Image (cartoon, rainbow, N blue to C red):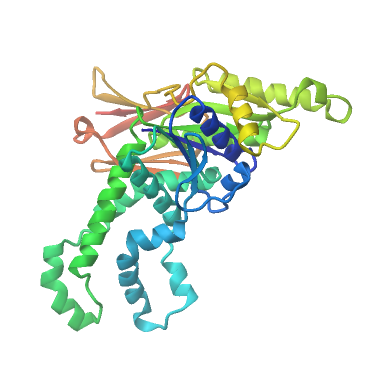
């Protein structure tokens, strides 16, 4: 099954583009499911029909669903949540505040992504199109599996055997309930599922992300930032879609100034995203709603291109042996080097770009080495180890 995720700044039309792509692929005799992970679902509005948390047939070969993260929340970690709730409520009564403490940032979105893993495992469809939340929330969504793995490995080292030995002592002395076997089972299952999800999303032969933007400077800047962050987390971006381009006929009178603005932005996108396929869609004369209109738009965007294909692959991390030591190169364009921070602690490397941070274990050949220096140049972060 092929997985394609669409993201972009709020209001750029990513839901319509995702829906149009799904229509185009379904029309090529592929079985397609288009899903929304955005909490403010609008996928059903695009098709002018009510969608639910179960796949619903939209047309021949095309199915749609809007994932209910609250429902997935209950399915995925009800027992674990109840255990944490007991800990929080030891000294207080149940309250809205306690409930809110149990909703970790990005966690509900992550559970929506876990549903995608379930769909993939079922194997009922040829292509899965995902309409993601706006960029900021999508980044939380995509980096969470990496962060959760780190949290489980570093901050949750309690083993089942050790917990059994400590259980009577801790419960008697501190009046804190220790996790039971079924809690450990659920934690282990959730961890394994998130680990499998992470591997799936990093498989560049299966999953890719497409960024939807509009020809406006602020939106293009966010698209570039998203691209850098996605590369930091090793996700493959295989397409950029420029939506809402004014047609020549409309650029008269009041809108005349927009011709230069849009041309400058489009040129900037072409120069910045060299090698990556760039698709353009003019602002339509009508709303992008209903199957027939979306099918027409899908054909306009992709022309002779098969949108279900992997349109581009980039090697984001490379390691090269040098005369002295190794060089780890990370392809990360559009970064302001003043916002870059790099720290090493043992075999773990942490890279920060402004408010985004990733910690990861170094490849085996670098684990006995230390960072000598790092340089950001030509869109690449080169880290030299000796």
Residue at screen point 15% across, 63% down: 160
**Quick one: 46 or 11, which is closer to the camera?**
46
Residue extending furthest toward the front: 60
Can see residue 349?
no
Q: Quadrant of the C terminus?
A: top left
Side (left or right) of 241 relative to 374: right
Specify the quadrant of the image occupied by residue 134: top right
Residue at screen point 58% across, 38% down: 14
Q: Estimate the x, y position of residue 366 in percent, counting from the top left.
A: 23, 32
Q: Estimate the x, y position of residue 232 in percent, counting from the top left.
A: 41, 35
In the rendered view, tell whether residue 3 sits above or below residue 80. Answer: above
Q: Quadrant of the N terminus?
A: top left
Q: Estimate the x, y position of residue 233 in percent, counting from the top left.
A: 39, 37
**Quick one: 317 or 64, which is closer to the camera?**
64
**Quick one: 204 or 128, which is closer to the camera?**
128
Q: How many marks?
A: 0
Residue at screen point 65% across, 23% down: 266
In the rendered view, tell whether residue 294 sits above or below residue 309. Answer: below
Side (left or right) of 231 relative to 271: left
In the rendered view, tell whether residue 169 sits above or below residue 80. Answer: below
Residue extending furthest toward the right: 253
């Amino acid at each position: 099954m092929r997985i394609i995720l669409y993201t972009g700044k709020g209001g750029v039309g990513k839901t319509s583009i995702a829906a149009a792509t799904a229509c185009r692929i379904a029309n090529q005799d592929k079985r397609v499911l288009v899903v929304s992970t955005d909490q403010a679902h609008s996928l059903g509005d695009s098709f002018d029909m009510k969608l639910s948390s179960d796949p619903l047939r939209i047309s021949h070969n095309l199915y749609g669903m809007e994932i209910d993260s609250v429902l997935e929340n209950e399915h995925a970690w009800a027992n674990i949540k109840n255990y944490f709730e007991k800990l929080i409520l030891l000294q207080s009564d149940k309250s809205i505040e306690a409930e809110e403490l149990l909703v970790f940032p990005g966690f509900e979105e992550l559970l929506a992504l876990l549903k995608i893993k379930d769909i993939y495992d079922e194997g009922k469809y040829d292509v899965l199109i995902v309409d993601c939340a706006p960029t900021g929330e999508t980044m939380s969504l995509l980096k969470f599996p990496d962060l959760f793995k780190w949290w489980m490995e570093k901050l949750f080292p309690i083993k089942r055997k050790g917990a059994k030995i400590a259980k009577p002592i801790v419960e008697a002395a501190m009046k804190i309930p220790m996790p039971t076997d079924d809690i450990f089972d659920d934690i282990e299952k959730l961890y394994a599922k998130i680990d499998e999800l992470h591997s799936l999303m990093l498989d560049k032969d299966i999953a890719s992300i497409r960024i939807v933007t509009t020809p406006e400077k602020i939106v293009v800047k966010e698209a570039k930032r998203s691209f850098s962050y996605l590369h930091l987390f090793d996700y493959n971006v295989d397409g950029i879609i420029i939506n809402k381009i004014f047609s020549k006929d409309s650029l008269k009178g009041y809108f005349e100034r927009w011709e230069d603005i849009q041309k400058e932005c489009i040129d900037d996108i072409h120069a910045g995203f060299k090698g990556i396929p760039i698709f353009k869609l003019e602002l339509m004369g009508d709303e992008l709603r209903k199957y027939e209109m979306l099918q027409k738009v899908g054909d306009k965007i992709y022309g002779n291109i098969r949108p279900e294909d992997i349109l581009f692959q980039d090697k984001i991390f490379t390691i090269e042996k040098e005369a002295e030591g190794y060089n780890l190169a990370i392809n990360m364009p559009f970064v302001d080097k003043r916002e870059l921070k790099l720290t090493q602690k043992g075999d773990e490397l942490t890279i920060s770009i402004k408010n985004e941070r990733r910690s990861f274990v170094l490849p085996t050949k670098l684990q006995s080495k230390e960072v000598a220096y790092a340089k950001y140049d030509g869109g690449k972060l080169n880290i030299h180890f000796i």
